[in-house]
Image: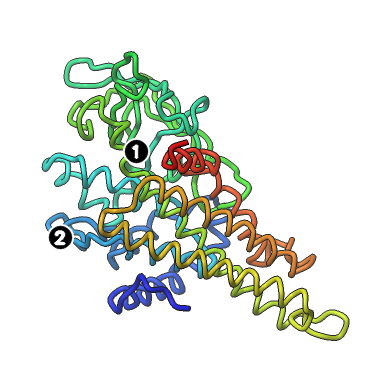
Amino acid sequence: MRSTAYGEEHEAFRQVIREFLVNEVVPHFPEWERAGLVPKEVFRKAGKIGMLGLQVPEEYGGGGTSSFKFNAIITEETARAGVSLGGLSVHLNVVLPYFLAYATEKQKQRWLPGLADGSQLAAIAMTEPGTGSDLAGVATTAVRDGDHYVLNGAKTFITGGINADLVVVVARTSSGGDRREGLSLLVVESGTPGFSRGRNLAKLGLKAQDTAELFFDDVRVPAENLLGEEGKAFRYLTSNLPQERLAIAIGAQAAAEAALATTLEYVQERRVFGKPVAAFQNTKFELAGCAVEIEAGRALLDRALEEHDVGELTAADAAKVKVYCTELQSRVIDRCLQLHGGYGYMLEYPIARMYADARVTRIFGGTTEVMKTIIAKSLGL
């Protein structure tokens, strides 16, 4: 079955992205994995072909589209090629929406052109050493002092934190009875005194994605760098979670599809006991089962893409899609790796890297357990 979510304009864009990945990413990707990050010039090249500014209005140098489907295609094609582009997904799908929705006109003129052309990369700093899914528990503080905020605290597991030129920091600007109140978004620019980066964290998978610790020691952030209204960050952050979780689901679904494709090729070439692995009934049953689950995931994802583009994707439905597609990703890749035998455990084979990369999708953007809690609430439980 073919996807029902895309039209001719989307498929034309897909070809552009596919060519970019083949020419600019695939040949260099092993080197980037060893280095632990994607060189910043790659993002500037991506900006030249319009990858980074799809939803940025034309007056700020972007493509001016309101559809999320073009972002989805970028995610799908990187998975298909067996590569990643560091913090690009966070830049496009998580951080940019805050600038588009809450920046003042002056801030848009200041930041959007660079975010669109790849000269400025963005990250968001929410997670802290003692605070993960409990966003209301943020302890980083920002105290108003004249025309500045004085920012103190530490963040961890920040995707794109090494390469980022702009970091949107979630900080507590006031305290009260409701822990969700009093959080604000402050844009911290690279090079600001007191702002430092710790380690590029060593991870099980996603080796080319820079994931950093960030530290803020009496960082004086201009009040004009406040994004949106003071104290409203919790509402801002939760309003964008459906898109963030949908983006994760897209990557998970695409990875499952890529795993099936590479395994189909492998089992037809690999021979054991004098015949191809594909000739065994177990192989046929396993891959047929994977194909059925993948079709179900694609149908669910297509529906979610359509609903998101018209503003109707709810938090609960986004949670359902994330749970299904990320769990699907892990099941399919595990079964596909098993069919590779010992070679599936070797990192030179794509399936091994897919296996390592898959584990985190059930954690970041909200764990599966948190997603199930959201779904249960929507059921009145």
Name the residue that disc number 1 marks: 238
Residue 58's disc is 2
For label 1, the crowd category at 10 Å Cα-Cα, with few meaning under 14, some 14 to 19 and many 20 or more, is few
Instruction: Place residue 34 in its image quadrant.
Output: bottom right
Q: x, y (%) of residue 78?
A: 47, 65
Residue drawn at x 54%, y 54% as measured from the top left: 326
The percent position of residue 317, horizontal first and vertical second, equals 41, 51
Marker disc for residue 352? none
**Which of the 4 quarters of the picture holds residue 169?**
top left
Mark 1–mark 2 CB contact (< 8 Å): no
The residues tagged by marks 1 and 2 sit, at their Cα atoms, a distance apart of 27 Å
Kind of residue at badge 2: Glu
Three-letter residue code for mark 1 = Thr
Which residue is at the front of the view, 196 or 227? 227
Please state the horizontal and vertical placement of residue 246, each as a whole percent of the image. 41, 54
Front one among 284 and 90: 284
Residue most toward the right?
273
Compare marks 1 and 2 and give the one earlier in the sequence. 2
